[in-house]
Image (cartoon, coloured by chain):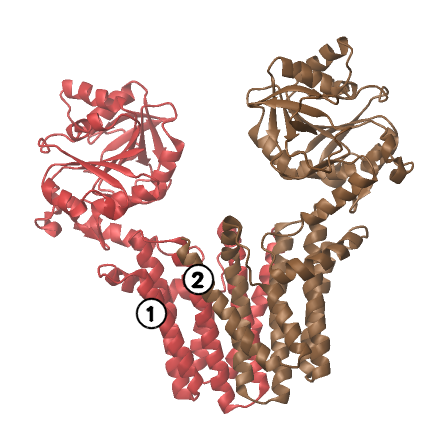
Chain colours: A red, B brown
């Protein structure tokens, strides 16, 4: 399925931040707005794009190219009449699009799940489906938004000045080629906007809608909406399975770091490596023994725990996530855990030469690694049952830091031995109860 | 979808082993033949059964019951004319079956994947699909088998005395209710067998087939075929991911044990528990230190490694496998590994008080647990690429036994440290290369 992206307009209101840059090229967390639209669509399985450019079209073409950089194909169409209604931009693509297609706006930021659902559900016998936000969230600029009136499964009316409305047009569409006729019909009636075409289909009962169901979208139109988009994108990186330390300490810090790093050329893999090296260093310093070293190593452990969030965050912000990347990150985390606990055991044993140190080190290591082993299955249940509590790596490393600061390495090993293995027993029981 | 099972015939030839027992009740690895048919069909998603009984029907009804024991629904039909052709048995079910249905023979043993494919693929516009074995395996009794002639996707002819044939009727069918008319038509022509009805559909071009593609099936007809069925069922328990020690040492022994235990009331969970307790015991004996204890512990380790195969084997033979059962078995295996390596480390340290013992114990434990952690992902690749080599728990425990027998615990820990962690590194590289 092809996607048509409208990137022709001037976007006057956003000049305050964009300066001379055409609106689709405004940067947001390491990618331009139009790159986010292309990559979100790619996540929904779309590989072919037609982009209609107008205002500063050459600049956009040069920056985005033929799509090979994003692993998609992109062709361009120029609309010299970009000062007129956006229905004309859609109409220009008529020759290039013969099948059902997705229509997107180059300056909208949205959760790619919306597009996945839209393409999966299809037209359902209609000629157009419009994604509609019925939640009327307070960051939608109601004065400027295109309103819609929906009834049962149909769009009944659409327009900026609609008085009786119950939803907002999110600017995400699925169309059959009939939309081109509809726009022509609307132009004859004096309305050259896309909404005009949609209204024609709506009048014939051929325009359905898809509820956004609380998922995120925003029309980036000015400084304020750009800031909201950034905040929402960062917030979407918080995982359901984040434990309490992650949620309240690590994630807020790692998101701030990622927000900066995403604008640099630092790759997710480099950060995975850095976090691993910090753990290695922390383990080596634990090895040396002595309170001062323990303090340093404990702090390093907590820092590596924070940094460990950044690789995934940056990968997701830049659409660079991969299954292998997540997997190798998790394997290295396990090795990092092992090195830290080995260092603690040796460092502790130096000051207190009893085999008990090693035995509890062993049990703490076993419990910790098997926490991660059982997590693969347990996390499914957490997600399905929307459980809040999760005892995981974030908590374990925090306990290690706390123990190190207090010079209580032996007690920490004993405590970890008990708590990690009890947690594994609890998971075995919970999963047994749930199956 | 309903399944109709024909269990009316007398099966004279098998009297040599069955004595007075009706053929469907002949035991095979802990279940009667008809129980295997019901449970194989349940694995393919079938929950409703109609069983046509005749010879000793009361005994069958009493033994199998209403299906609640197998979590399915079973109704019975009596065919007093069971001495006549088996087409009559099918015809008796006419009132009970209004939709497409699966037809099975109570005395055939088969891989349930065949049935999964058959129900998934459906009738493909025909009125009947017959599963056909085109491999002419040497254990098929060609004199007694029903032969078929297939051409393109159709059955062209069927019969016991067919001279020009290229396949064998496996006795597994998918039918629309049209088969009832076809059998009636055949009876009028003087043939009251099921093959007669199939021939009527075949002549109209309404009978398709599904190739068995090398999967296992057998018509259990005498002592010889019963033995083949047992051998094939046991062979199907060997996993693609079995490592070399498992394949050539553990599995041949565990299959012999399972073959006996499957006829007792010992449950898979009890065996999981026993294997874990043996590992625990082995770890405790390692703890005591000294060569004699090491030898005993090493042998116990290898025994627990063998027993560890039996729970899964019995569960699969009795259709009692569950995802949770497999998972908890794997978690307990990890704890068993940890206890054994902890015992080795302590036992070794008793005779050789150097922290290096503990450090290598730590590294061996880390490598071993992370072998299992990485296996979850790596095994997918093994299966997809049909790779032969697998370094896993079977090999690790065998190395531990060998080291214990030679009183070389420290060397064993060093060796395990190196080989398990190198294997993890290798997997990281292989998976990186394959993604």
Quadrant of the rendered image containing residue A89: top left
Q: Return the chain for callout 2.
A: B
Q: Where is residue A108 in the image (x, y as percent from the top left)?
A: 24, 42
Q: Return the chain for callout 1.
A: A
Q: Residue at x 65, y 29 (%)?
A: B132
Q: Where is residue B18 in the image (x, y as percent from the top left)?
A: 88, 38
> Is A200 above or below relative to A405?
above
Circle 2: element type: helix
Q: Which residue is drawn at 67% across and 47% down?
A: B236
Residue B22 visible: yes
Report which residue position mark 1 lands on: A274
Local crowd at mark 2 within 10 Å, few (<14), some, or many (≥20)? some
The disc placed on residue A161 is none
Circle 1: element type: helix
Q: Is residue B117 left or right of residue A30?
A: right
Residue A189 visible: no
Report which residue position mark 2 lands on: B428
Local crowd at mark 1 within 10 Å, few (<14), some, or many (≥20)? some
Most foreground residue, A230 or A42: A42
Q: Farthest residue to the front: give it.
A: B163
């Amino acid at each position: 399925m092809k996607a048509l992206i409208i990137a022709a307009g001037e976007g006057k209101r956003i000049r305050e931040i964009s300066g001379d840059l055409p609106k689709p090229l405004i940067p947001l967390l390491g990618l331009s707005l139009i790159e986010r639209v292309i990559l979100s669509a790619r996540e929904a399985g779309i590989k072919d794009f037609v982009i209609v450019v107008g205002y500063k079209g050459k600049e956009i073409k040069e920056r985005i190219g033929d799509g090979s950089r994003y692993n998609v194909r992109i062709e361009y169409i120029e609309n010299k009449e970009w000062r007129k209604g956006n229905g004309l931009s859609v109409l220009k693509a008529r020759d290039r699009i013969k099948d059902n297609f997705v229509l997107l706006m180059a300056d909208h930021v949205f959760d790619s799940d919306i597009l996945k659902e839209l393409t999966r559900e299809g037209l359902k016998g209609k000629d157009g489906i419009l994604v509609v936000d019925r939640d009327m969230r307070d960051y939608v600029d109601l004065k400027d938004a295109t309103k819609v009136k929906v009834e049962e499964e149909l769009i009944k009316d659409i327009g900026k000045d609609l008085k009786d409305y119950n939803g907002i047009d999110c600017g995400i569409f699925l169309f059959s080629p009939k939309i081109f006729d509809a726009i022509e019909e609307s132009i004859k009636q004096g309305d050259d906007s896309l909404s005009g075409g949609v209204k024609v289909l709506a009048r014939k009962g051929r325009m359905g809608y898809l509820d956004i169901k609380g998922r995120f979208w925003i029309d980036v139109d000015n400084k304020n909406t750009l800031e909201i988009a950034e905040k929402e994108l960062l917030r979407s990186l918080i995982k359901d399975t984040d434990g309490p330390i992650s949620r309240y300490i690590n994630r807020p810090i790692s998101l701030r770091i990622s927000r900066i790093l995403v604008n640099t050329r630092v790759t997710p893999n480099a950060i995975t490596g850095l976090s691993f090296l910090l753990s290695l260093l922390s383990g080596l310093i634990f090895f040396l023994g002595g309170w001062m070293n323990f303090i340093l190593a404990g702090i390093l452990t907590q820092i590596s725990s924070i940094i460990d969030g950044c690789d995934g965050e940056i990968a997701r912000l830049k659409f660079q996530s991969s299954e292998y990347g997540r997997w190798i990150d998790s394997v290295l985390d396990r090795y990092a855990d092992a090195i830290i606990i080995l260092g603690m055991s040796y460092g502790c044993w130096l000051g207190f030469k009893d085999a008990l140190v090693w035995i509890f080190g062993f049990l703490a290591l076993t419990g910790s690694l098997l926490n991660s082993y059982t997590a693969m299955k347990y996390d499914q249940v957490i997600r399905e049952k929307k459980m809040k509590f999760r005892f995981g790596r974030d908590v374990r490393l925090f306990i290690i830091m706390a123990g190190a600061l207090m010079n209580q390495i032996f007690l920490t090993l004993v405590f970890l031995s008990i708590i990690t293995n009890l947690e594994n027993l609890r998971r075995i029981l919970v999963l047994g109860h749930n199956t």
